[in-house]
Amino acid sequence: MQRRYRRVAAHFEGPCASEAVPKTWLEVECAGAELRFVDDTFDAEYCRGELAKLGRLVALEERAMSLKEIFIAVTRQRGGKGASL
């Protein structure tokens, strides 16, 4: 599970757009030129391809998440109604 889930920060040349992000991206936040999210099926090549559809990507940072962070992200996505990992 920890191999799949990643916390991602994408930096764009201009303002980010978060309207058409994949369903596997959780906790999506857009602030200025930075798009932050959690990807529950992370694949670097696929991620870069999807981000390229949103604008000119300048930098991409990703990091593994702890089991606690994964649990919190999944629980929030499900509206706080519990999570089955």
Image: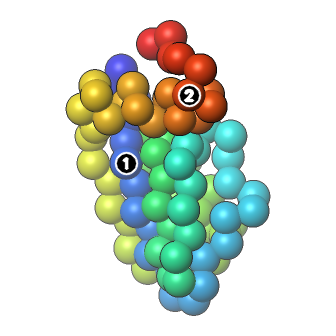
- Name the residue furthest right: 20
**x and y percent of residue 13 in the render?**
52, 87
Quarter placement of the N terminus: top left
Q: Which residue is mark 2?
A: 80
Report whether 81 appears left or right of 38: right
Q: Disc number at residue 53? A: none
Q: Residue at x 67, y 46 (%)?
A: 22
Q: Which residue is mark 1?
A: 7
- Name the residue furthest bottom: 14
Quarter placement of the C terminus: top left
Give the amino acid at mark 2: Gly
Can you say whether 55 is above or below 10 in the image? Answer: below
Q: Secondary structure at mark 2?
A: loop
Name the N-terminal-most of marks 1 and 2: 1
**x and y percent of residue 55 in the render?**
63, 76
Report whether 81 appears left or right of 75: right
Residue 47 visible here: no
- Name the residue furthest top: 84
Give the amino acid at mark 1: Arg
Residue 1 visible here: yes
Q: Residue at x 45, y 67 (%)?
A: 10
Can you say whether 49 is above or below 43 in the image? Answer: below
**Residue mark closest to the camera, 1 vs 2:** 2
Label 1 and label 2: CA atoms lie apart by 19 Å
Q: Residue at x 37, y 48 (%)?
A: 7
Can you say whether 30 is above or below 20 in the image? Answer: below
Splitting the image into 4 quarters, where does residue 49 fall? bottom right
Q: Secondary structure at mark 1?
A: strand
